[in-house]
Amino acid sequence: MPSLGIEVDVLIQLPSPVPSPAEGCCNGITCPGNLQDSSAAAIAADFAAQYVDAGMLKDIVEIYEEPRHWMTFSNEHLRVFRVENAPGDTTLTHIHRVDSLYFFFSESQVQGTKWKEEPKDDVLQDGEVRYGDHGTSCTLIHKIHNKSRPVMMCLDVEFAGFHQEPPAKRPKMEPPSISPPLKLIKERPAVRVYTIDVAAGSSCSCALPFAKVLLVVHRGARIRGTLGECFVKAGDVFFREGPEEMKLEVLGSRRDLRLWVVELLY
């Protein structure tokens, strides 16, 4: 072999001897999950012991630990989690501790299983909004299995700031005077929920007489106005402090815009 004109020190490291089953793998101590055989169960246990976060092996995880719940927005008043559950997929068993709103973006058939209860089937509608009084009444511990073909998508909005004051100290907020295109669809202890619809190619000016509000996009479109000029997508959120006059223009002729407007009552 021709010389390259350089000297190379070669270090050959011999592999360590493989311990026998009697010896174990750690100086006679068997490692967690190492079952010393090649069965599928042993391989899975070895993999879990080395690579899986121990926190994911808990019977119940916090919502921010559940891998299908992605936090997309957070401040002192609320937290927003985007949830996507693929066909045939099941979430980990997780806990909801504070009052929450659930916004659904697809028609799905799911099966919910509360902790230590039997599974129950449920049908979710696109555009449906549900309220969970998990902090006011009782916590919810459950898992969700998607039985249908489309991905089950929803936003879980947690009203963390609602529970910072005892009920007796929460301010009583009377319903404000509203006008179209605002339409009230739901009222609960922590929030009021409205909708705004703007047709493709049209515009509107809307008074938002609220101190704190979360805008949730149900049907997206390209817009111009108070929120800037951009394409907003289903599931996008905007937190605003007011009151303010909001102007919206929907650009193009193909997509209508629908927003949920969440007034915070705390």
Image (tube, rainbow, N blue to C red):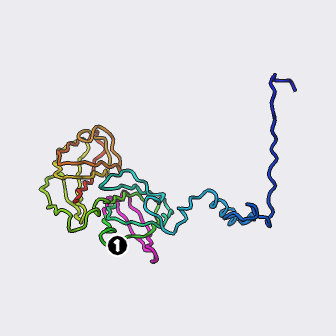
Image position of 42 (left or right of 216): right
Residue 150 visible in image: no
Q: Which residue is mark 1?
A: 138
Q: In the orientation shown, which residue stands out farthest toward the right? A: 1
Quarter of the figure that contains the C terminus:
bottom left
Image position of 265 (left or right of 128): left
Instruction: Name above or below for residue 233 compared with residue 264.
Output: above
Region rendered in magenta: 103-129
Q: Position of residue 263 (x, y in %)?
A: 23, 56
Query: Callout 1: helix, strand or loop?
Result: loop
Residue 67 visible in image: yes
Magenta region includes residue 124: yes
Q: Kindly identify the amino acid type of the residue bearing the numbered disc 1.
A: Cys
- Residue 175: quadrant of the picture: bottom left
Q: In the orientation shown, which residue stands out farthest toward the bottom? A: 117
Give the residue displayed 46% in from the left and 77% down from the top. 116
Quarter of the figure that contains the N terminus:
top right
Residue in front for this viewpoint, 5 or 253: 5
Q: Position of residue 66 (x, y in %)?
A: 47, 60
Magenta region includes residue 187: no
Q: Position of residue 60 (x, y in %)?
A: 48, 68
Give the residue displayed 27% in from the left and 52% down from the top. 214
Q: In the orientation shown, which residue stands out farthest toward the front? A: 27
Residue in front for this viewpoint, 84 or 53: 53
Q: Position of residue 127 (x, y in %)?
A: 31, 58
